[in-house]
Image (spheres, rainbow, N blue to C red):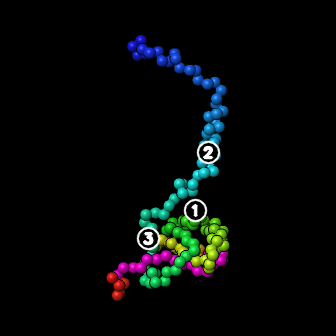
Amino acid sequence: MITRPLDLASRLRTEPRSLDWLFFMNGGLIVVFFMLFGSQFVIAPALGIDFQLPAESGAVAEARSPTSFISVTDSGQIFAGDGLRSLAQLPGWLRDQAKLARRQPVLLVRASKGVKFSLLTEITTAARATGFVGVMYAAVEPSGIAGRP
């Protein structure tokens, strides 16, 4: 008697009998909303912290304004536009970007230091085949070049 002085359990309403369908409907709607309004950026992996551009002398002097860009990691992941793309999906995305460009389309490839040359060659070939006039590779100006600070 001391443990239940107000007798609250007797004043509670009874639980609903047949609302099981409502719980399944709520679960289904949550799944539908995640599928419709979910973002690829939440689940898709991003560029790693160790992403480093290669160093090349004259990188700043030869820079041009690109119309599109992609990022390629050491593991071969290609990030183009709104998320991760495979090498097979890349030509379709490049074709759409070349059509959107108002002037001659130029692609900037931001490739990390350890990206295989064969992958870069395939990307360049796909870009040229889909209408890009130029393909540039991002690089940084190395420090310690003769005649420079």
Identity, as a three-letter code, of the amino acid under mark 3: Gln
Where in the figure is residue 14, as x and y percent of width and height?
58, 20
Q: Nearer the viewer, mark 3 or mark 2?
A: 2
Q: Measure the alpha-carbon separation of dots 3 and 1.
A: 21 Å
Q: Residue furthest front?
A: 102
Q: Measure the alpha-carbon separation of dots 3 and 2.
A: 38 Å
Residues rendered magenta in the picture: 125-144
- The residue located at (48%, 18%) in the rendering is 8
In the rendered structure, find residue 52 and report the number of the disc placed on it.
3
Where in the figure is residue 97, as x and y percent of width and height?
63, 71
**Residue 131 included in the magenta stretch of the image:** yes
Secondary structure at numbered mark 2? helix
Q: Residue furthest bottom?
A: 147
Work out whether mark 2 precedes mark 1 in sequence or the reverse, and give the earlier one. Answer: 2
Look at the image and tell me whether residue 121 can be seen. no
Work out whether mark 3 precedes mark 1 in sequence or the reverse, and give the earlier one. Answer: 3
In the rendered structure, find residue 82 and report the number of the disc placed on it.
1
